[in-house]
Image: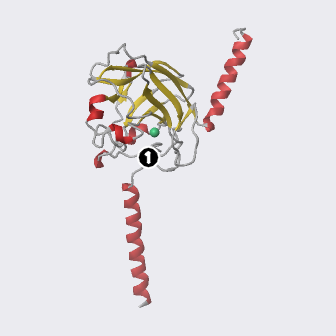
Amino acid sequence: MNRLLSRLGAVVMAIGLVVLVVSQVQSAVIPPNPMMTGGQAGELGMYHGMISINPANEIVVHLGPGMSPAGNTPELPLKFTPDTHPDYTDESGTGGPDWTVLNGRHFNAQLGWIAENAGTWTVPSGSAVWIEPISVTGPGTLEVLEGGQGATSPLLPMDQHTLDPIFVGGQPWKWFDRDIADSLNPPFIASGSGIMTHNWYVTDTPGLYEVQYRIYVGDATTGVLDPTYTPAQVNVAWVPEPASTAIVLLGTLALVCRRGRNGQL
Ligand SMILES: [Cu+2]
């Protein structure tokens, strides 16, 4: 009887091990998404460019921290998650993104574009609000991959990210399309905070990156600027997380010392 029980125990343990291994293989590993994770490890908190248009047809953008379920108060510069993060999985089989594009790379998705005072302003039918990088500086290449839009958008629900490259060659990217907003159910007006989009900033060369954006109203298809609206400009910066910041600081110090010797300061 005892032998039977111990054999039974061994079989149960073996099944348990198989279940454990299979579940580990199948479990999704997704990056810390500041806009939807609720305190997931590595979640840095949202940082927003809050966009509105005032009665004088001027675009107004306020930069500031958004919600952080982990209790963080994010501020500029935003912090890249280092390339030592876990290997993320391809979720395209279940309708999600293929997160493997982030593996082995430094990335950040804290910056979200969001409507301020949604419902109190709009643009004409056929028009859209576009975001355009007019200056990008940094030690390497900064790629931007398209993230998910607000939960009320039929284009890109919050949990769906195309991860398509955007801003390629300085191209503008459409954030708010009047006619799509009008077709929303519930309508854009009722969504309160409006359409939120967090794109993914990715690089293989960590360091200080600064992007100057122009936010303007233009044709919803061509992106050609409508001069009856005054564009806004904002600057956003990214640096490595503190662990790797020391290396960058050392590099900067070395550069300052060298410049000092050369009399260039
Ligand atoms: Cu957000």
Instruction: Locate residue 75, reporting x and y percent.
Output: 58, 34
- Answer whether residue 199 is visible to the viewer in this image: no
- The one nearer the camera, 171 or 113, is 113
Q: What's the residue at 25%, 36% (across, down)?
A: 183
- The one nearer the camera, 147 or 231, is 231
147 with respect to 79 (left or right): left
Q: Quadrant of the C terminus?
A: top right
Q: What's the residue at 30%, 44% (across, down)?
A: 92
Colour scheme? secondary structure
Q: Quadrant of the N terminus?
A: bottom left
Q: For ligand 1, give the image quadrant.
A: top left
Instruction: Locate residue 226, reporting x and y percent.
Output: 34, 15
Q: Quadrant of residue 23?
A: bottom left
Q: Residues within 10 Å of mark 1 (few under 14, many from 20)?
A: some
Instruction: Locate residue 258, reporting x and y percent.
Output: 70, 15
Q: Quadrant of residue 245?
A: top right
Q: What's the residue at 37%, 60% (across, down)?
A: 22
162 with respect to 246 (left or right): left
- Answer whether residue 135 is visible to the viewer in this image: yes
Pointer 1 residue? 36
Name the residue type under label 1: Met
Callout 1 secondary element: loop
